[in-house]
Amino acid sequence: MADRPLRELDGKTPLEAANKPALDEIAHLGECGIMDPISPGRPPGSDVANLALLGYDPFVCYRGRGALEALGAGLDVQEGDVAFRGNFATIDQKGVLVDRRAGRVDGRVFKEYLTDVILPSYPEVQVTVCPTVEHRLAIVLKGKGLSWRIGDSDPHGGEAPPKKVEPLDRSPEAKGTAEITNELLQVLKERLGDCPINQRKVEQGLKPANIILVRGAGAPPQIESLRKLYGVSGACVAVNAVVRGACCSAGFDILEVPGGTGGVDTDTVAKARVVEEIIRRYDFVYLHVKGTDNASHDGNIELKIKMIEKIDAMVRHLLDHLNLDETYIAITADHTTSLRQRDHRGDPVPLALLGPEVRRDNVTAYGERACASGGLGRIRGVNLMPILMNFLGNVPLYGS
């Protein structure tokens, strides 16, 4: 949701330009600050940023995004497994990548063509491929002697052929896992090439989803649940797989949302209604909306503002339907995504905290610059969870 000032908005950020009375109300009645999701000036991925917001230092516990993506998709990922996040993508007849998202295709239409995958050279390796939201998917490898220390096949921009997956260390486990992954990608490429859905796309002049790119090979993060750390029960209201995976790793229950899509068409108020229904069953609820990030990556200013206003409608429902005498609400972003660069940046994000014993400051609007003058000052993402748990009385005394 956070961004940089834009000439098209007379020097305002989309958050500053949007009509967002509910967000402004929280800032006006609460305490504000700005937050570096992982550290000042360090652009964070969504994976490490959400781990940080849950109170876990990603520089200590992070072991690749793939496991979070797979856990969030509901897949079983155990120690010793290797998981990937991936994209359905499009290559041309020369093998050059022309669209990393295959037109943001709904990958679930290919699910039946990606089951029962057996690798000719490695039949002992169990493979699971699971399309998630839009063009995204998760893959899990199970077998002996696997290593998550391998690279990506995604060239990450520009018109280039997909990369060969390489080991990132000299271990035989990494070398073998890279070879397994390259064979898997070839098998999946052949299946997609023979798929009637893609054949029809080519006939219609549309981009086929004729290859899969993998990146972020990983294992589950080594963390303790929030119940063990703070004695709290948690629930996650999100569609995005990596956010669900981070919350799953933290020991949260994952709630489904009717009308939640993980895209710009998501029903934000439906998410608020789910929170309203479950709030008395949980100590902590993690509510996430993805659409502002999608709009930023597409460079769509108007859509980003619209998404911020949809989030404001969600917040309005929460303010109107939760008991604010006993509830704390924190509003923030997991990273800055620049509309200009269409990518994550290391700029701090705004934070507003509302609750019965919050020290109100003089901030009157929710935005990147307004919140910077608030009483919370400038904190790191890992500081947010202790602040919230302190309000709940769940942080033990340090010292005597």
Image (spheres, rainbow, N blue to C red):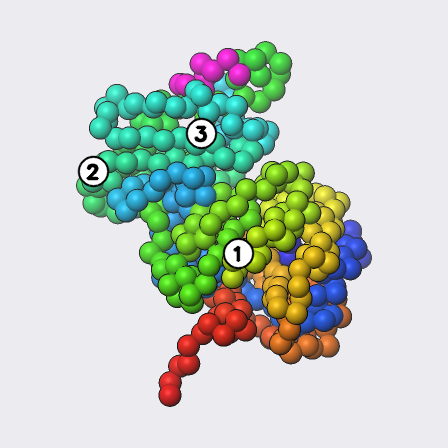
Regarding residue 150, the answer to whether it shows in the image is no
> Which quadrant, please, contains the N terminus?
bottom right
Q: Amino acid at mark 1?
A: Arg
Q: Are marks 2 and 3 in contact (CB under 8 Å)?
A: no
Classify mark 1: residues with Cα within 10 Å, few (<14), some (14-19) or many (20+). Answer: few
Q: Position of residue 315 (x, y in %)?
A: 69, 56
**Residue range corresponding to the magenta coloring:** 190-197
Position of residue 13 in the picture relative to residue 280 (left or right): right
Tag 2's secondary structure? loop
Q: Amino acid at mark 2?
A: Lys
Disc number for residue 144: 2
Q: Position of residue 232 (x, y in %)?
A: 45, 63
* Residue at the image point whose x is 66% and y is 45% from the top: 270
Disc number for residue 281: 1
Marks 2, 3: nearer the viewer: 2
Position of residue 46 in the picture relative to residue 228 (left or right): right
Q: Position of residue 149 (x, y in %)?
A: 30, 46
Q: Position of residue 283 (x, y in %)?
A: 51, 61
Q: Amino acid at mark 3?
A: Ile
* Residue at the image point whose x is 41% and y is 23% from the top: 114
